[in-house]
Image (cartoon, rainbow, N blue to C red):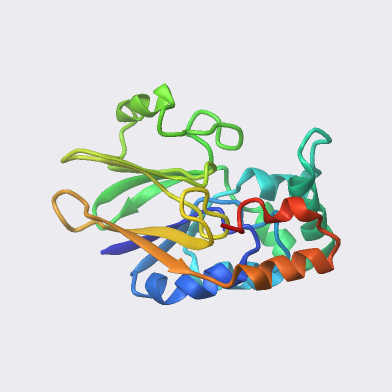
Amino acid sequence: MKVAIISDLHANHEALKAISDDIAQADVVVCLGDLLGYYCQVNETMDWVRQHVTHCVLGNHDHFVLHGCPEHEPPAVRFGVEFAAKTLAADHVSWLRRLPLTCEGRLDGRSFLLVHGSPWDPLGDYLYENNPRLTELVHLNFDLIAFGQTHRFVHRCDEKRVHLNPGAVGQSRDRDTLACACAVMLDTRTMEIQRLIRKFDAQVVLRLAHAQGAGPWIEKYLVA
């Protein structure tokens, strides 16, 4: 079974469209949260997710859309959250409210855990490559643990388990202006990992954001 793992879409439907053919080749699509925030293709992104994703968890930006954005967050975060909160269709709001903070189960005989930040703090943690808590994941009894939040690819594995951050679809911070995701082959002995990386038209995303009042700060992660 081939499982596509996506994260941090951030209302960037241009990026989703660019990588959708790769994702369509998977048997199952799972999402690690932050569907919303930063950019302005809010309902198009939600439509896509609800059509294609089978397992999804809530991200911190999604939580902000539902419950309000803290004042200390930077302008780019507040802009995307506030735009999504006033734009999101009512049925998408209801669906978003039902998302769990963590999701666990089995696919093709493999156990999995999905989170946005970390298993210990699903909304607040950032498991960067140098975070010592990455080594603690081995103590959790899952074959596959997938996490997002940092927008950066992380991959640690052995013969029995995989710990993976697929990078960000909508706002990659290690591959500028590229939509990044991963696919995992569960029916192989070592659970093979395939990176999915596609170019998208960042200018479309930026024009939409600027038209809604975004300042130059919105370009930080989309202009190489």
Could you tell me if residue 204 is visible in this image? yes
Q: Is residue 160 left or right of residue 147?
A: left
Residue at 70% x, 60% y is 39
Can you say whether 196 is above or below 132 in the image? below
Could you tell me if residue 88 is visible in this image? no
Residue at 35% x, 46% y is 112
Image quarter (top left, top right, bottom left or bottom right) of the C terminus: bottom right
Q: Is residue 40 left or right of residue 150?
A: right
Image quarter (top left, top right, bottom left or bottom right) of the N terminus: bottom left
Count of labels shown? 0
Q: Is residue 51 left or right of residue 96?
A: left
Provide residue 221's location: percent of width, then percent of height: 61, 52
Q: Point out the residue furthest to the front here.
A: 224
Provide residue 100's location: percent of width, then percent of height: 57, 47
Q: Nearer the viewer, residue 4 or 99?
A: 4
**In the picture, residue 171 is in which quadrant?**
bottom right
**In the picture, residue 22 is in which quadrant?**
bottom left
**In the picture, residue 211 is in which quadrant?**
bottom right
Q: Is residue 186 left or right of residue 211?
A: left
Can you say whether 90 is above or below 69 in the image? below
Provide residue 206's location: percent of width, then percent of height: 70, 65
Q: Nearer the viewer, residue 196 or 7?
A: 196
Provide residue 118's location: percent of width, then percent of height: 49, 34
